Image (cartoon, coloured by chain):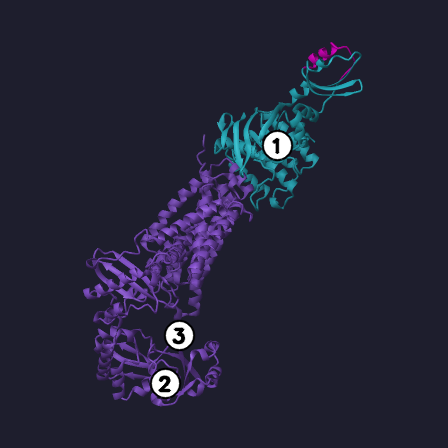
């Protein structure tokens, strides 16, 4: 004879409120502080300057709002279900004549109430403050409703995740830790996966996968941009659906769960191996990523795998068995290590065919090629995308790609300073194919890259100035890259058109070798367009037409560093100079070091200085080092010679 | 009333309860004895519907207990450390109990104030262990359960309160046929109230006895003969134990008093005395070898 009200017991709700109500109150007070109070504070202070930063109710102290959204629901779930995790209370509550389902619903229901009521009250108060404080211009009613929806739904989702984890584990601390790990897991495992696959699959573009919004897969990271992006309809539906799933899954687990699981790490036997192997795998991948990335060697990578899997496997066992003496049982670890090893070997043999795959020429609609993934990802300032469409270029790209695949061994030898080469194919059927390769500096692909890089199409992609309507330029500003205060600007229409024409001629004539030689630009050229946009281009020493034009218009002195700006110029063999001084901040010591060496060449002739300027590049590891000293030694620059471009007089000096 | 049929339960990887058969009649007080780790608490929690047995049946009035809300309304389980919600006083705890247990008797709750001297409005977690246990008894008796299950209930109680509680319990058993299941590691603590005892050792029931039967069935006899009978005379009776001091024999014998007497008469003893046995001695002799293994629960 079940009584009519067996599904609801006021005293249980009272008990939950008495013991756990403070969390709801903290939540409420936190929201009061973040919203109504802040609105009032800004109003009474007349902080109008900050009003432009207010886009929606999230803009008021979003950090605090979001912190509450992440912490309160987990805290609430931990405290509500603490009774399941402590032996005495678990025994007591389960000895009462209340079915587990009813008990669960009381606790979950009160949790939902604690997460709902404060939000509703705050939402109403924001409505009221909006009209009283006259904020209708800043915040629309719709935005308040969206705020209410998100601030209600998102913490609810986190809450149900924490409840679900609470049903699996038997310890409150573990519940908290595992909840946050679970919420980070979707992004985390993809990051770990991408970083690890890249070491075993030639051509896999981890940068592309990492840049494809995988941060939105983790609710914690997704929510961090509620202020700017809100929540998409899809996300809202997904979270709502997951709440329902998590509710029923948690209830089912709760009914299955043994009372005596209180205070054991994992409440279900079946979860234990999942937990142990899961932790072992993740820690293994993490250590692999850490050692692989920092050391850049296969040996360290393998060390990371072994150390990480040992740490993860035995660490997880320690948590489950609540003792550190777990090393007796190593057999299963060996099985685990064996299967991981087998998978790695399979990857070595390219069992998916990923490494060899190249699209057919007639499948390709367009292709992006470049040293950075961002070239593809962002369209440039003028809204163009960086795709090559001409069949000649596509064929050249394919030839290059096939060479990279066939010369796998050469390109696999990774060096930290290697260049990356990205291939991003868009196929006729709408599919995409992305590859990324490390290309060692000394590995010559010139004959393959040259026709692509020197093609008109490619240059127009990387130099937007080539396809720009020059009449739209209002002003050209040139400012020196060297530590001297030099700059010039061109504002006259005719001069603008002429200088751009000169610059374009230089760009079109630029060879692949010149594009790659890493020489230092004299100055930066900035084009200010009449639509308030800007275009930027470096003035390279080999832009002869532009230089000539500046000379003709008497602007050369103002627009770049010249021999007159230099106080002293020294050249020394790298091996003779104390390398530690390169990184010191003391100009005097550096100058003293150069002065003290017999082998050093001091360049005095203005023309010679010009030649050195023209052929210098940012320092790396060239055979000779150049020291430019400006303004009586107040500032110095260390430079290298461009490969194979050392002026004859320098060569003569050192080869004597 | 309470029936356990071939109950098994693993607890933290050990077989805590193995093939336990147990019967407690309505209106009786059953003492479950065993040393530490024998599985008493686990068995009690299974009977109270807190834990679920891995195998076997646990029935009260013929129906399973686990997740049986209607049945559990009539059961109170008193753990060895009583649990109360934090910040709760006896009065708020009572109002919680009254909403959960339909047979709650408010009048009795008020009346019991005379027996337990506990402040009703003081937070329970501020009380000593003994006081909290009294509070738990107070609540349990006010809930008017049909079945009262108690795990080591008298630990930490002074003799006066112990007596009072035993009286209350016996009164309820007598008046409303309440069934009581008590665990203890000490026979003496419960022998004055229990009518049945069972001994649990390493998860299994070693023996189950009606105490009255036990007391009337076992006898200690001091006997001496003029003409010593041949060795066989010992085999003719159920002798649990014997020893010889000079010409005097000391025997512990099982059987009806009259039969034992007449049997000895046939050998014409010069001395024949029937001596009283303590319950403790009965157990030790009754259980023979095993008895020595679990002697500590009988002290």
Badge 1 and badge 3 both on one subunit: no
Residue A481 location (% of width, % of height): 36, 80
Residue B42 location (% of width, % of height): 56, 35
Residue B41 location (% of width, % of height): 58, 35
What residue does disc 1 label? B183
Q: In the picture, which chain is purple?
A: A
| Residue A390 visible in the snapshot | no
* Residue shown at the point (51%, 50%) measured from the top left: A315
**Tag 2 or tag 3, which sits nearer the N-term?**
3
> What stretch of residues is rendered in magenta?
B256-273
Compared to residue A518, the image places residue B37 above or below, namely above
Within 10 Å of disc 3 (Cα), the crowding (few <14, some 14-19, many 20+) is few
Q: Does the magenta stretch include residue A27?
A: no
Left or right side of B187 for A35: left
Compared to residue A66, the image places residue B27 above or below, namely above
- Is label 2 or label 1 in front? 2
What residue does disc 2 label? A652
């Amino acid at each position: 004879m079940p009584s009519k009200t067996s599904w609801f017991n006021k005293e249980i709700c009272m008990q939950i409120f008495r013991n756990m109500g403070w969390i709801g109150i903290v939540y409420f007070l936190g929201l009061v502080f973040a919203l109504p109070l802040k609105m009032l504070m800004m109003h009474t202070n007349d902080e109008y300057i900050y009003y432009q930063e207010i886009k929606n109710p999230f803009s008021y102290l979003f950090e605090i709002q979001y912190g509450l959204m992440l912490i309160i629901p987990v805290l609430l779930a931990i405290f509500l279900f603490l009774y399941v995790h402590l032996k005495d209370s678990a025994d007591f509550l389960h000895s009462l004549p209340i079915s587990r389902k009813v008990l669960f619903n009381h606790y979950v229901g009160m949790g939902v109430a604690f997460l709902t009521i404060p939000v509703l009250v705050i939402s109403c108060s924001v409505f009221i403050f909006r009209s009283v404080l006259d904020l209708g211009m800043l915040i629309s009613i719709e935005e308040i409703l969206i705020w209410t929806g998100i601030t209600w739904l998102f913490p609810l989702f986190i809450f149900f995740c924490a409840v679900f984890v609470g049903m699996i584990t038997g310890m409150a601390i573990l519940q908290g830790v595992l909840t946050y790990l679970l919420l980070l897991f979707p992004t985390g495992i993809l990051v770990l996966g991408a970083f690890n696959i890249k070491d075993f699959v030639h051509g896999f573009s981890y940068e592309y996968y990492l840049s494809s919004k995988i941060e939105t897969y983790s609710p914690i990271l997704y929510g961090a941009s509620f202020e700017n992006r809100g929540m998409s309809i899809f996300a809202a539906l997904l979270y709502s659906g997951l709440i329902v799933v998590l509710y029923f899954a948690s209830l089912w687990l709760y009914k299955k769960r043994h009372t005596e699981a209180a205070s054991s790490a994992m409440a279900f036997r079946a979860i234990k191996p999942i937990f142990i192997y899961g932790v072992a795998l993740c820690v293994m991948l993490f250590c692999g990523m850490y050692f692989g990335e920092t050391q850049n060697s296969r040996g360290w990578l393998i060390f990371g795998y072994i150390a990480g899997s040992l740490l993860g496997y035995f660490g997880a066992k320690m948590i489950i068995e609540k003792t550190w003496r777990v090393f007796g049982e190593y057999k299963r670890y060996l099985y685990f290590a064996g299967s991981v090893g087998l998978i790695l070997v399979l990857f070595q043999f390219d069992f998916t065919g990923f490494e060899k795959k190249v699209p057919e020429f007639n499948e390709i609609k367009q292709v992006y090629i470049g040293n950075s993934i961002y070239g593809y990802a962002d369209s440039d300032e003028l809204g163009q995308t960086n795709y090559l469409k001409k069949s000649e270029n596509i064929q050249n790209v394919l030839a290059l790609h096939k060479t990279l695949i066939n010369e796998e061994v050469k390109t696999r030898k990774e060096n930290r300073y290697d260049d990356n080469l990205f291939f991003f194919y868009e196929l006729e059927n709408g599919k995409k194919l992305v590859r990324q390769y490390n290309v060692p500096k000394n590995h010559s692909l010139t004959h393959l890259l040259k026709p692509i890089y020197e093609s008109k199409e490619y240059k127009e992609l990387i130099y937007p100035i080539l396809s720009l309507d020059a009449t739209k330029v209002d002003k050209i500003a040139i400012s020196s890259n060297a530590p001297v205060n030099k700059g010039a600007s061109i504002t006259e229409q005719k001069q603008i058109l002429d200088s751009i024409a000169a610059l374009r001629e230089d760009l079109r004539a630029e060879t692949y070798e010149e594009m790659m030689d890493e020489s230092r630009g004299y100055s930066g050229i900035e084009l200010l367009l009449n639509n308030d946009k800007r275009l930027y281009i470096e003035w390279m020493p080999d832009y002869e037409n532009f230089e000539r034009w500046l000379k003709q218009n008497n602007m050369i002195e103002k627009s770049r560093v010249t021999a007159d700006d230099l106080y002293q110029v020294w050249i020394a063999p790298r091996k003779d100079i104390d390398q530690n001084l390169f990184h010191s901040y003391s100009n005097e010591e550096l100058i003293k070091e150069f002065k003290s060496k017999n082998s050093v060449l001091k360049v005095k002739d203005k023309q010679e200085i010009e030649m050195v300027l023209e052929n210098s590049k940012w320092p790396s590891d060239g055979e000779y080092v150049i020291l430019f000293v400006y303004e009586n030694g107040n500032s110095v620059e260390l430079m290298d010679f461009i490969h194979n471009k050392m002026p004859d007089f320098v060569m003569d000096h050192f080869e004597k | 009333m309470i029936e356990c049929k071939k109950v098994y339960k693993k607890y933290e990887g050990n077989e805590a309860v193995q093939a336990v058969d147990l019967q407690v009649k309505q209106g009786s007080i059953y003492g479950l004895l065993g040393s530490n780790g024998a599985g008493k608490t686990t068995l009690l929690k299974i009977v109270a519907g807190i834990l679920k047995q891995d195998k076997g049946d646990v029935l009260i009035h013929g129906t399973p207990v686990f997740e049986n809300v209607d049945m559990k309304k009539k059961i109170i389980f008193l753990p060895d450390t009583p649990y109360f919600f934090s910040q709760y006083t006896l009065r708020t705890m009572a109002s919680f109990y009254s909403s959960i247990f339909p047979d709650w008797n408010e009048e009795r709750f008020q009346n019991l104030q005379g027996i337990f001297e506990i402040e009703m409005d003081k937070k329970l977690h501020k009380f000593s262990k003994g006081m909290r246990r009294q509070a738990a008894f107070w609540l349990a008796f006010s809930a008017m359960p049909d079945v009262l299950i108690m795990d080591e209930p008298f630990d930490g109680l002074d003799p006066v309160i112990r007596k009072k509680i035993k009286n209350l319990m016996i009164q309820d058993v007598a008046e409303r046929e309440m069934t009581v299941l008590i665990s203890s590691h000490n026979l003496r603590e419960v022998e004055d109230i229990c009518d049945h005892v069972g001994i649990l050792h390493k998860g299994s029931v070693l023996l189950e006895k009606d105490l009255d039967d036990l007391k009337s069935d076992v006898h200690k006899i001091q006997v001496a003969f003029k003409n010593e009978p041949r060795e066989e005379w010992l085999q003719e009776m159920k002798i649990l134990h014997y020893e010889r001091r000079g010409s005097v024999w000391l025997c512990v014998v099982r059987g009806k008093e009259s039969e034992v007497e007449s049997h000895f008469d046939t050998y014409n003893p010069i001395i024949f005395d029937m001596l009283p046995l303590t319950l403790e001695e009965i157990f030790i002799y009754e259980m023979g070898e095993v008895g020595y293994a679990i002697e500590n629960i009988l002290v």
